[in-house]
Image (cartoon, helix red, strand yellow):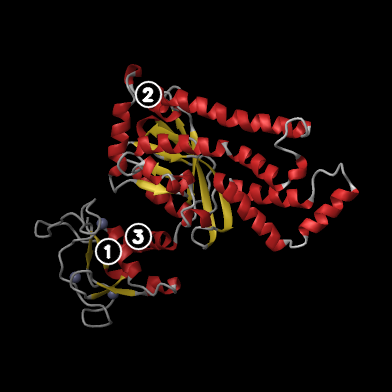
Amino acid sequence: MVVLYDDLESLSHHQYPDYEDHHMKMLEFDPEYHMGSAEIVFSLVYFLLGLCLVAPPTEFIHAGLTVQNVLASYLGSEEMNFINYHIKRSTATALFHSIIPIGYYVGMALFAPHLHLFEWSRMTLMWQLYLGFSILLPISVIALTYHWSGNQWANHPIAKTLKYHTTSNSSWQPVSSSINIEFRRITKFTAGPPGRRVIVTDSWVMLTSTYNVYIAQQQDIHLTLVASEEHSVTPEEGTAGAQILNINVATVRNNVKSFVIRLNALEYSDLREKLSAPIRNARNIVIHQSLSERFLVAFQEQVDNNPTVRKTSSLEVEQCIGCMAILADVKLQKRCHNADDGDCRQCYCRPMWCLSCMGKWFAHRQEQGQPETWLSGKAPCPTCRSTFCMLDVCRIV
Ligand SMILES: [Zn+2]
Ligand SMILES: [Zn+2]
Ligand SMILES: [Zn+2]
């Protein structure tokens, strides 16, 4: 607090060199004078500082000035032990936030001696009440922490949520380790700022918040797209026209709270891929797709209008080498011109790609700044490099 006070003092001297003189004059004129410009400046600076600590702006996060980073060695690795990390993180955050009001009081006492904040009998009733509150707050949070930490943190809200996911109220530890294991997999979906991160693993949907982590099991949830907000600029990417979707995660499990996850519309299809349940769009909210997603739709429509290739015993079909998820289902067959005309060449490769991977490949090979030319563009076959256009992509049926 002393450091903080010194900083603030030098700051105010720097900005208001004649503040002290001015202040003394005002005191002479008005002995009952309470709130001067110095206190207002201190209050504003402290308020802003407090706000940055409670809800760190992107600049603070990038500079590493968050509770998580300062306490990194105590918290351990989120990657290795997700649940334990967040139990400690949320507790430490609550403790840290609880001392912000008393910090203000001490700072003000040092900064404005004429308020006599270190003498109980001479301070105003308002300051007495404030002091009482700012001492009670950390004491209650310490008591709460003590309660939470009992029985190996079994009383912490996160551990309690996990307990509700066990059968017949058994220990929360096995659920915790199953989440930790899934969190370590690189296939998990994550989105959003560090303070409110959406995490979807194979069987869990989670949302981190300042003092808690909302947790629901995929098999228990109903997802509903409830709202969409248009933002002209997002701080994260600086791109214009971001659409933020709000998705309500309601769980059928008793005692487990529902929550709302927020994410950029561009991440929506990745989220949907990771979820086993569908997302209901009861209000028919129009989701803005990214350029490549819209292109993929147009690409598929064109291919659906092209002639198809029959699957024969000589035509071997293997797993798509792009996504390894589905069977290859397209073949490049020159159809746009006669065999020797035009830029396209006949490709003799066996089918190795699925339609959506081929579409992504095609989009990648186009002039990125000119999407209007993509539909009439050409790309080389991923394997033999023969040029093809969209008319040459044939579905295998
Ligand atoms: Zn594929
Ligand atoms: Zn080829
Ligand atoms: Zn062609």
Report helix, strand or loop for mark 3: helix
- Which image quadrant is residue 350 in? bottom left
308 relative position to 146: left or right: left
Report helix, strand or loop for mark 1: loop
Q: Are marks 3 and 2 in contact (CB under 8 Å)?
A: no
Report ligand 3 position as a quadrant. Answer: bottom left
Crowding at mark 2 (Cα within 10 Å: few <14, some 14-19, many 20+): many
Crowding at mark 3 (Cα within 10 Å: few <14, some 14-19, many 20+): some
Three-letter code, disc 1: Pro
Three-letter code, disc 3: Gln
Which numbered marker is on residue 307? 1
Q: Which residue is mark 3?
A: 300
Q: Are marks 2 and 1 in contact (CB under 8 Å)?
A: no
Please tell me which residue is depicted at 32% across the width and 39% down the height of the picture. 81
The CA distance from mark 1 to mark 3 is 13 Å
Residue 219: x and y in percent read 35, 31
Of residue 228 and residue 33, the one placed in the foreground of this image is 33
Q: Nearer the viewer, mark 3 or mark 2?
A: 2
Crowding at mark 1 (Cα within 10 Å: few <14, some 14-19, many 20+): some
Q: Nearer the viewer, mark 2 or mark 1?
A: 2
Q: Is residue 277 visible?
A: no
Report helix, strand or loop for mark 2: helix
Q: Quadrant of the C terminus?
A: bottom left
Three-letter code, disc 2: Lys
Which numbered marker is on residue 163? 2
